[in-house]
Image (cartoon, coloured by chain):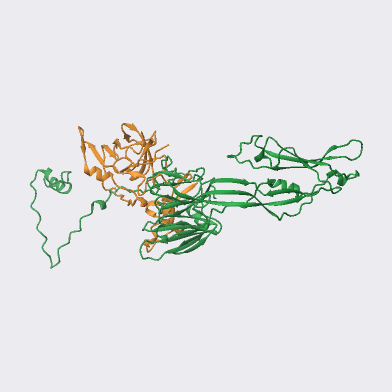
Chain colours: A orange, B green
Amino acid sequence: MAVTIRDNDPWTHAHPDEWRAARLARQKRPPQPDNRVPPPPPLGVRVTDSLGAPLRDEALPRGHAPWLCPERVEVWNGAAWLESAAALKALAKRSLYLPAAWPDETDDRTGVTGRLRVTFPPGPATLSTPVRRVLTARATVGVWLVDAQTAAWLVDGQATTAYPLGPHAPGGKRPPRGVHPWAIRTALVAPPSDPLILELDTRGSRFSQLLLALSGAP
Amino acid sequence: MPDDDLLTLLLGCGCRKRCCCGAPDPAPAQAATPLFGQAPRTVPPPRLPDETPFIPPPPWYATGQRPSDFGNQHVPRNASDGRPLSRAGGDDTQRAFTLDDGRLRSLTDSYTVDHEARVIRPNDEITGIEETQTTAPGEYFVTGTRVWTFISGPGWRVPEPSTTMSSTFSRTYTISTNRVIPYATGVETSSTRTVKHTNQAKLIDFTYQDQEMISNSVAPVRPTELRFEVFKDSTGEVLFKLVGLVNRGLGTPNEEHPMGLGSWLIPIPTGRFSGGPDDARTAYPFTPNQIYNLPIGERTRSVPIQLVWAPLETGPRPELRSRGERWRGPGGAVTVQGYPTSDHAALVGTDILTCPAGSWSGPGSWAAYRRAAGGTVLLIEHADQVTRVDLPPGPDPPTAQSVPLAVFLAGLGITEWRGFGRAGPLHNTWPPHEATTRDSGSSAN
């Protein structure tokens, strides 16, 4: 099991069990502010993901992030598609990726709901193999399909499989209320080097970020 | 009715809005006059929207999981306990690095990496070996080792060759050197040099002796003729034997008697020699079935036969690897000294990793990632310790802290440890986003 390691951020990485242990371990009175967060792991680093053996480095151009930001968002108002700069601003938030100088723009106070038509720019020209596209999003849980154990979002009218991420989201179950990061496996198959226009039906969820991953789903 | 008025006063109409009662809006109340000289009561500040009681804001959940898996098709997901789903992979033996435009360039050789000049320098490579055999006129030139070991075996008296002859066997190596692959283009440039190793032939004087004459009671008889028979079998090995024509005086005059058997391996260069039986000059140092006249002089031992001999071994191949700076980070802050390799995450042997916080020598492994507060973090595994080195970007001094490897693994929940992984030191952008560890089946050089 190969893992990836980054700096520990308790607000991002700490598991609920660790928060609980830190709460039980801290002194009752007076409250020490430093005791609120779980103690850091050794050397202040954290395992952030588990992965199969990295065969090599990612096939990303220099300074390119592994996502694509949307460049145009249209909102369905019941009769027509209307281009919305506010919706674009709400969705086109970057995630932390330091080699591409992408800061963490996590801010869930702005979001979009309803039917959206999102345009993504073309990716790097070298990624020309068609893959099943994966969206990286931040959204509230919304309608949860109990039988399919996933959110009920539609991309181009087709059902998707969404995996809630983050240390508070158990796999296969409805995550707790709130805004979660998601990996959405769509039914679209397209090469990442082509531009992509997709229609997203949020079905009651509120999306505050929508990025298109360059690597596809198996 | 006073009771109704009282109820209406206490309960109201069921609506908190004043307008629905039909009554006109009352005039705004006058500011309270100070009673007994007190100051008016201050109005509490309005609550911010996200502090509204009973309606907590939705919590935000962040993730540390990456959106991709180093170019493999992958969707990150959680296990049922909310931790990243454990996945195991095969092998990270694929030798490749990523160019600036995102293409993967595979490299099977060893190489050094210079992130300051943004180039990869592959090791020198032998592109061709040419063997040339120069026979001087009048010399029976023999190459090979096994003829020598046979001749110098028991039963033969061979002095150490000392006389140098003018025939030569030489091996010329064509070496591609100064190989440079820039990250920007991926086009390799190189130049060529040649190294020639030459073996000068030497004169071998040897005598032969009838093998049976040593052990048997038969009186040793000198052969009257000596024939040197050479033949080649299907595998290309050349066998030879010395056949003497002897007359032991037992009624069978002129019986042929083997004097010795042996073989040696003739090198068959693939490009130059087709291996056909007609190419006698290349395949056989002697003309097949060449008959040497026996010199008559001694009783049991021949007079010296002279061969011109050169070994095929021209010494070790030219040294292509040279120890030096095998990895260099931007600005030269982090360097690794050692031999060129294809696994730059491993610290083997006498490799030395040098950074402003100190030096660490192998064996071990190392990885790097971007520090959250800017700069670079190095993780160095060395001598059952894991050291974290922070290299801040500004004037802050570098820091180093160490924990035992067992504590590090237990704290991070890593169950199997094979060192830090190869991904990262070769990417077109350094330091990478995160450090990686090695998975099962990984092979270090």
Asked whether A192 or B115 is in front, the reply is B115
Of B440 and B426, the residue lying toward us = B426
Indicate the position of residue A94 as horizontal and vertical percent values. 31, 48
Q: Which residue, as the protein is rendered here, is positioned at the far bottom?
A: B37
Q: Position of residue A205 (x, y in %)?
A: 30, 40
Q: Looking at the image, which residue sits at the far front?
A: B137
Given residues A108 and B92, the one toward you in this image is B92
Q: Nearer the viewer, residue B11 or B177?
A: B177
- Where is the N terminus of chain B found, in terms of image quarters? top left
Residue drawn 80% across and 47% down? B208
The image quadrant of residue A118 is top left
Image mark count? 0
Tell me, yes or no, if residue B69 can be seen here.
no
The residue drawn where x is 39% and y is 36% is A129
The vertical placement of B55 against B377, above or below, is above
Looking at the image, residue B417 sits to the left or right of residue B77; the answer is right
| Image quadrant assignment for residue A131 | top left
Residue A171 appears in the figure: yes
The image shows residue A56, relative to residue B280, as above or below, that is: below
Q: Is residue B373 left or right of residue B140?
A: left
**Residue found at x 72% / y 54%:** B161
Percent coordinates x, y for residue B89 in the rendering: 50, 43
Residue B82 against residue A76 in the figure, above or below: below
Image spot of residue A192 (x, y percent) = 35, 38
